[in-house]
Image (cartoon, rainbow, N blue to C red):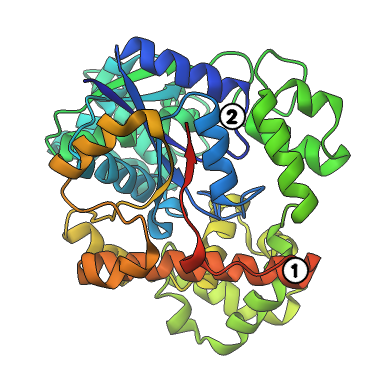
Amino acid sequence: MKTVGIIAEYNPFHKGHAFHLQKAKSLAAADYAVVAMSGPFTQRGLPALTDKYTRAKMALENGADLVLELPIPYAAGSAEAFAQGAVSLLEELGIIDALCFGSECGDVNALSSYARLFEEEPEDYKSLLKYYLKQGFSFPASRSRAAEEYLHYTEHVCVCSRDDADCRQESELLEHPNNILGIEYCRALLSRRSSIRPITLRRVSAGYHDTAMDSEFASASAIRKAIQREGLSASVEAQLPKASFRLLKEAFKVCPPLTIDDFSSLLFYRLLTLSRQELSSFQDISPELAARIENNRFRFTCCTAFADLLKTKDLTHSRITRALCHILFDLRQAELDALKAEGWPVYLKPLGFRKSAAPLLAAVKEKGASPLLVKAADAQTILTPVQYALFEKDVLAAHICESESLCRYGADFIHEYTRTPVILP
C-alpha cells in the first residue's frame, strides 16, 4: 500500500486542486491520498470561505481519502511553521511515502538545493547574508541574494548597496510563493531526516496571486475575489468541480463567508487590553511592530484598514494580517518556540475520510505515533499535554468563528465537541 501526502487550505477546492490530487496519486503511484488541511483560518491570517468540514468534504468528493486538521499555530503561521507543522503531521501518521506539492518552478532538485542551504547555513552563506543585511536589504531580499550568489557564483560582488542598479539580483525562484513554501517543505523533510519523498508538480495556468478568471485553472485568490464581487456566479462555477460548487452553495445558504473585518470588534478589544510588551509576545510580532500597533491602535476602524495603516516597505499587508490573527487567537511566540524545540508536535484529528479507505485507517492505527482523535470528548484522555494544548487552541478558533457566524448571520452555534468527521462511501 502506497500513500501520498498533500498539504492544503482548499479555500475553496477548485479544479486546479482536483488536477493536483489526481497527478499526486499518479506520480507517487499511490493507492491513497492523505491531506493535511488548515482549519477555520488560513496562512495569510484570514478566515476561510467556509468551515473546515465542508472543505474536507470537497476534498473527499474529489479524490482524497483522509483529511486531517493542521493545528492553528501552524496553519496560521509563517511559511516555516506552516511547513514544519504539516510535514510533522504527515510524518506522525507513519504511512506516508511521498509528499506532492505544487511549485512555480516544478524542479524538486532546485528546491532541495535551497532547502539544504537554508537548513545547513554554511559559513560562507551566513557571511553573504550578513553582508546584504548591512546594505539595507530586508531579510527575504538578503536571503535571496545571498543564496543566489552562494549557489551560482564563485566570487563575491563587493560593491553593492540597495540603491545600486548593478547589485546582485534576487533569485527568480525565490520570488514565487509556492516555490518558497516548497523549499520549506523540503527543509522540513531534511530536518526530520524523513523517508518521505518530495515530489513537485509545476503549477499550470494562473499564478498564486493571479486574479484572472479566464485561465484553465484560476487561482484560489482569483476565485475568492470573484465570489466577493459577484457571489457564486457562472464564472465561479466554471472553475469549481461540481461537488465543490454544490457544497459551497449549501454552506452559503446557512452562513455566507466571514471576512477578517467581521472580527474587528473582538480584535479591537484585544488591542485595548494589551501593552506594548505583551503585544511583542505574539507570533511574528517584533518590538517594532508592537510599537506601531500600540501607537496607532486608537486609529483602528476595522482589521483591513488597520493592516493598511501598519504596513511598511518591509511588512506586507498579509504579514500584518497574520500577526493580528495571532493576537486574536492568543498564539504566542514562546509557545511556538517550545513547539519547535520539541520537534513540532501535532495531534491526529480526522475532519473526514472515505469508508473505502479502511485499510489506510487500520495502517494509521497500527503505525501512527499518536491515536486518531475521532471524538473530541476523548481528547483529554488520549492526547499528551502538549497535544491537548494544541487541541484547545483549535477548539477556541472554531468557537470564535462560530460566534461571529451567529452574530453576523444568525447561524446556529455548533459546539466543536458535537462535530463528527465527514464520512463518505
Badge 2 element: loop
Report the disc number at residue 350. none
Dot 1: element: loop
- Quarter of the figure with residue 353: top left
Query: What's the amino acid at mark 2?
Result: Tyr
Q: Can you say whether 221 is above or below 256 in the image? A: above
- Quadrant where the N terminus sits is top left
- Observer-nearest residue: 283 or 391? 391
19 shown above or below 167: above
Q: Of label 2 and label 1, which has the lower sequence position?
A: 2
Q: Is residue 185 above or below residue 386?
A: above
Q: Position of residue 341 (x, y in %)?
A: 17, 60
Kindly identify the residue that appears in the image at 20 percent across and 67 percent down.
Answer: 384
Q: Position of residue 163 (x, y in %)?
A: 53, 37
Q: Nearer the viewer, residue 295 or 28?
A: 28
**Amino acid type of the residue tagged 1 in the rendering:** Cys
Whether residue 26 can be seen here: yes
Q: Residues within 10 Å of mark 2 (few under 14, many from 20)?
A: some
Judging by the rendered image, the residue that carries numbered circle 1 is 302
Is 78 in front, or is 65? 65
From the viewer's perspective, is 214 left or right of 174? right
Mark drawn on residue 208: 2
- 10 Å neighbourhood of mark 1: few (<14), some, or many (≥20)? some
